Amino acid sequence: MPSIRIGFSTDFNLVGEQVGIGTTNPAARLDVAGQITVEDTASSGGVSTFREYQGFSQVQAKITNNTLIDNADCGPFSSLTGEIKITGETTVSSGSTVEIGKTKTLTIIDRFAVPLGDTNSRDNAPEAGTTRFNQDFGTLEFFDGVNWKTVNSYNRGNAAGRAVFGGGYSVSGTNNGDMEFINIMSLGNGVNFGDMVLTAKYSQAACADATRGLFVGGQNSVDMEYITIASAGNSIDFGNATANGNHNGALSSSTRGIRGGGYTAPANSDVMDYVEIQTLGDAIDFGNLLEGNYGLCGFSSPTRGIFAGGRGADQPLGQTTINVITIASKGNATRFGDVSARHAYVAGFSNSVRGFITGGSSPTTDTIQYVTIASEGNAQDFGNLTVAKEGSCSGNSANQVRGICAGGVESNPAGTKVIEYITIASQGNAQDFGDMSSQRGYAGALSDSHGGLGGF
């Protein structure tokens, strides 16, 4: 094919099937030696698909200067077809960013990476639906318009819906050092899980995320130990709480476990401390309850934690105040409302909507009270346990359908092995579930499907 030369120098050359502008030796279909300037691009048609002379799409196009692609009518660039497609690899050089406003449809044919960072680097008020990878927890998380929540991306199999009871005070006057479990949605007796390895003790609290359970404090102890809920076996040392505490309460979200209160002579504790459940280590100060308290219970939704019931120095028959905290942020508790009947040594559990306060002492009672966790107010009557008792296994032994109340002390020192349950959505009395393997009071209880899961 002959060369074509236009002008007084080598302005335009056609060599073979390659066109050169400003060069006599073009190295590509179109080889321009120098800067290309285009004015009023939007009016002249905007961004078009690059095509080879055969009609096929060009596989690579490079934009090396600062370029804004806008969907406005008169923006610097607008697509002829209403969309811009990137089907190959897009590279953004180090120190540069690509910012996109609204994209109606985005198809990725190879791989896609979301923003990542630690918990402290989260945007406090992003748009609902914003998704990122949390490096602290190794999980995807999204913002629902109010809070950051984890994306549950694992299969818990047959362990989902398991409740575990550990420790406690036996009717013989000795402390239990064993654990047992049940499946919440099926009736039956407790099955051996393993042994607590630190000490056999009573009055500890318990909490859990979806895979790991913690038993905290108890009997003048700062010990914390953990189990893997899906597999039976002995507990393992986790770390230490910030202070001793008998008859403390605990609650948790998907990531954080929080302990509150406890009996620490000569004064009752108002201390709350917390741990990140998937990391081993000692607890860190969280804040303070409204007043010193022991014999209380804890439960939660994905965002809020509740401590209720118990006994204070100025209220020996039982506390009336219900405390509320925001789990994801440290700070002191605020007032939620009041219990309908005040008792100490209560047991609590919740799904993501309702929380329950069961049993208690001074005098021993069979009452079941409940609150709606998202709205503040006083507790209301739900129904009755099958027997009046205090010191049932305390912790979040529940799923979204059922709450479990296990063991306890009917009239000191007569303990009970009875496990009973309620259907959370409907008010009414508890029903028989089965029996634990031994009488157990003032023990810890936890589950892998309670109401606090799904939040940080």
Image: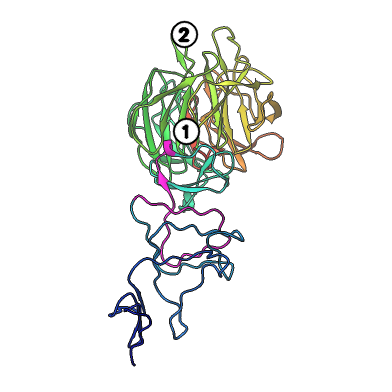
Q: Tag 2: residue type?
A: Ala
In the rendered image, the residue lying farthest to the bottom is: 1
What percent of the width, then of the height, locates residue 226?
A: 38, 35
Q: Which residue is mark 2?
A: 267
In the rendered image, the residue lying farthest to the front is: 8
The residue lying at 41 percent from left, 47 percent from top is 116
Given contact means CB atoms under 8 Å apart, are the residues at marks 2 and 1 in contact? no
State whether residue 343 is above or below residue 97. Answer: above
State whether residue 421 is above or below residue 293. Answer: below
Say which of 378 and 162 sits in front.
378
- The crowding category of the residue bearing disc 2, from other C-alpha atoms within 10 Å (few below 14, some 14 to 19, many at least 20), is few
Q: What is the secondary structure assignment of the residue under circle 2?
A: strand
Say which of 188 and 348 sits in front.
348
The residue lying at 37 percent from left, 28 percent from top is 224
Q: Is residue 182 covered in magenta?
A: no
State whether residue 384 is above or below residue 97. Answer: above
What percent of the width, then of the height, locates residue 372?
A: 66, 32
- Our reading of the magenta stretch's main secondary structure is loop
| Quadrant containing the N terminus in the rendered view | bottom left
Note whether residue 244 is visible: yes
The residue lying at 54 percent from left, 25 percent from top is 297
Q: What is the secondary structure assignment of the residue under circle 1?
A: strand
Note whether residue 165 is visible: no
What percent of the width, then of the height, locates residue 367?
A: 66, 25
Q: Tag 1: residue type?
A: Cys
Instruction: Give the quarter of the image for residue 30.
Output: bottom left
The span from disc 2 to disc 1 (Cα, nearest Å) is 25 Å
Q: Which mark is residue 207?
A: 1
What percent of the width, then of the height, locates residue 186?
A: 57, 47
Q: Which residues are magenta?
A: 95-121
Instruction: Give the quarter of the image for residue 347.
Output: top right
